[in-house]
Amino acid sequence: MTDKLFTRGKLGDVELKNRVLMAPLTRNRASREGDAPYDIHVEYYRQRAGAGLIITEATQITPEGKGYIQTPGIYSREQIDGWKKVVDAVHGEGGKIALQLWHVGRISHVSLQEGGAKPVAPSAIKAEAQTVTEDGFVDVSEPRALETDEMPRLVEDYRRAAQNAREAGFDMVEIHAANGYLLDQFIRDGANRRDDAYGGSPENRARLILEVVDAVVEVYGAARTGIRLSPLIEVAGLSDSDPMSVYGYLIPELSRRGIAYIHMVEPGTQGDLDQDLGYKTARLRELFDGAYIANAGYGRDSAIRVTGSGQADFVAFGRPYIANPDLAQRLEIDADLNEGDQSTYYGGGVEGYLDYPTLEEQKVA
């Protein structure tokens, strides 16, 4: 009998050929002028079209949302056209692809912002993090707090980005609200010290995420909208005094809106959580009626286990997809995996990006 991981599945109204998903992987290879995907991106994603769903690298919704050099955007004509070529290539191989919508918030540097402006954040609290600029690794800059009257503009930025993604032909969009970036910053009381309608209570801190979700759903429909969350992960000094309270409010609200999935960055490695964190993750999962994508450094056996038991509907794989463009096939037949060269993970060109062989190519060689 075929393990459930390798069977067809459905995210919202999008049919997938398997439950092995490609997680977002920042590779810092967008064009230096214009932050656009180009020919190497087309081939990179085409090679990985065997995944049930590709979720693209995080893609900034505006120039303000940029936090690292050479990450792609979805706000200019050049970017839209570049992504359309990627989408067409994936579709040509029978694959499905979602764009991840990203705003880094305070995880940025003034040299990456237009006019040398300060990055934006819920509150003027500097993150404990570094980023990559043309000068290499540097500490992130102190941000400025967004004004209350800027929130509609920010929501509109997400709506416009979703419209651009739709024009490029993406099957779905994923809202990035995890890993210490802007929307994650708003929901955590360690970064959000506001005293307006977007700070304080769990309902207020979740307000911006829900407004963004509503705007994106208007463009894509709930059945083609997902969200990435990391409620039990602390990164870049981002913390919350009671994550179960605020996410215990947010996740049912997301469920009520009928979005296709939550993509959960779980704590732990290889899908093995300690008892307390495992309980908390399971409790949050129970609050959502849609599909649950698990992401926690899973391997083949742990992914088969959690999909087979119903703990997860799909599993997203990150780094294994760097070195194994045909990862879904390799996992299904339990083939050996290529080892990735970490020195080529970020930046550069074709080397370490397009030159990892598939099983078929290895046989020919």
Image: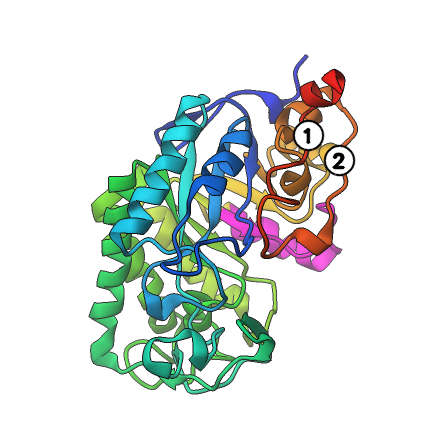
Report the Cα–Cα distance between label 2 and label 1: 8 Å
Return the disc, 2 or 1, that comes first in the chain's sequence: 2
The region drawn magenta spans 263-285
Q: Quadrant of residue 320?
A: top right
Say whether residue 324 is left or right of residue 150: right
Q: Residue 116 versus residue 174: which sits nearer the camera?
A: 116
**Location of residue 245 in the rendering, given as x and y in whole percent from the top left corner:** 49, 67
Image quadrant in which the N terminus is located: top right
**Location of residue 354 in the rendering, given as x and y in whole percent from the top left corner:** 60, 38
Say whether residue 77 is left or right of residue 224: left
Q: Secondary structure at mark 1?
A: loop
For residue 338, the mark is 2
Q: Identify residue type, mark 2.
A: Asn
Q: Secondary structure at mark 2?
A: loop
Do residues under tags 2 and 1 come within 8 Å of each other at their CB atoms?
yes
Q: Which residue is mark 1?
A: 357
